[in-house]
Image (cartoon, helix red, strand yellow):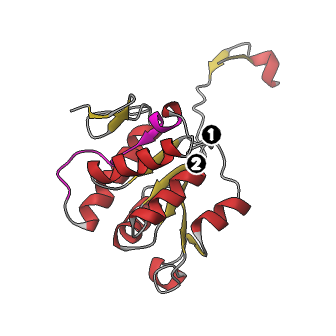
């Protein structure tokens, strides 16, 4: 941006160039599931500059003492919590609950929302079962194409901490426009049938 001296109140008659770089506000990540992966991801995402929100129905896992300061923790039924809370369209939603039924309930409540990112943890077989159930309920294949599943970059992660790193890496890639489209090398795409894109 070019400023002339007379526009800034200066009398020297010179010019100056000022470069303005917009700073994006810290993005919100909502982690549905406070188990081992959710716990590791929450702490890492906070360090990486995300505003972290965790939702789980188990107070033993979802508590501020466990997650530490800076993480917004909610104890409650995930579909019930989602029914009464809105997420901004810039938000990232990560589904890492403790089981198939809870993942299904969470994805059902999230998949139709206009969010920056929706990711689902699980094996390819589990993801297919969840997708099949939602299609039978009337959700569209187009809605499911938006989901990153299995979640995370394919780095060979095994432990909860490694899985959290792979998820955080994918969130950062999406944030910087490097992985906007789900169904990349570590994901599945729904095209009427679930298929690997590897």
User: Percent position (x, y) of residue 50?
Assistant: 51, 55
Q: 57 or 31, which is in the foreground?
A: 57
**Neighbour class for label 2 at 10 Å: few (<14), some, many (≥20)?**
some
**Of label 2 and label 1, which has the lower sequence position?**
2
Quadrant hosting residue 23: top right
Placement of the C terminus among the 4 image quadrants:
top left
Q: Residue at x 39, y 29 (%)?
A: 192
Residue 32 colored in magenta in the image: no
Q: Which residues are magenta?
A: 143-157
5 on left or right of 77:
right
Q: How many marks?
A: 2
Displayed quadrant of residue 183: top left
Q: Secondary structure at mark 2?
A: loop
* Mark identifier at residue 114: 1
Crowding at mark 1 (Cα within 10 Å: few <14, some 14-19, many 20+): some
Horizontal side, residue 98 vs residue 140: left or right? left
The residue that mark 2 highlights is 91
Residue closer to the observer: 38 or 98: 98
Along the viewing direction, whichever of 163 and 64 lies nearer the viewer: 163
| Horizontal side, residue 30 vs residue 126: left or right | right
Quarter of the rendering occupied by the N terminus = top right
Q: Identify the residue at image location x=43%, y=56%.
A: 48
Could you say which quadrant of the image residue 83 lies in? Answer: bottom right
**Residue 51 position (above or below residue 116):** below
Work out whether 171 lies above or below 67: above
Location of residue 164 in the rendering, given as x and y in whole percent from the top left corner = 33, 60
Q: Do we see residue 27 in this rendering?
A: no
Q: Residue at x 27, y 66 (%)?
A: 161
Please determine whether, in this image, residue 3 is positioned above or below residue 161.
above
The overriding secondary structure of the stretch rendered in magenta is: loop
């Amino acid at each position: 941006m070019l400023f002339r001296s007379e526009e800034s109140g200066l009398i020297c008659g010179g010019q100056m160039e000022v470069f303005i770089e917009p700073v994006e506000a810290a993005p919100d990540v909502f982690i549905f599931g406070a188990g081992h992966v959710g716990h590791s991801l929450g702490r890492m995402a906070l360090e990486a500059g995300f505003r972290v929100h965790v939702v789980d129905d188990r107070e033993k896992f979802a508590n501020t003492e466990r997650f530490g300061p800076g993480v917004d923790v909610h104890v409650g039924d995930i579909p019930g919590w989602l029914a009464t809370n809105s997420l901004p369209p810039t938000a990232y939603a990560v589904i890492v609950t403790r089981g198939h039924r809870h993942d299904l309930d969470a994805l059902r409540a999230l998949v139709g929302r206009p969010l920056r990112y929706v990711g689902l943890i699980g094996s390819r077989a589990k993801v297919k079962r969840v997708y099949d159930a939602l299609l039978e309920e009337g959700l569209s294949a187009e809605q499911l194409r938006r989901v990153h599943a299995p979640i995370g970059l394919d780095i060979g992660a095994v432990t909860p901490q490694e899985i959290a790193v792979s998820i955080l890496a994918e969130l950062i890639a999406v944030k910087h426009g490097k992985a906007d489209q789900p169904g990349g090398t570590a994901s599945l795409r729904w095209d009427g049938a679930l298929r690997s894109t590897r």
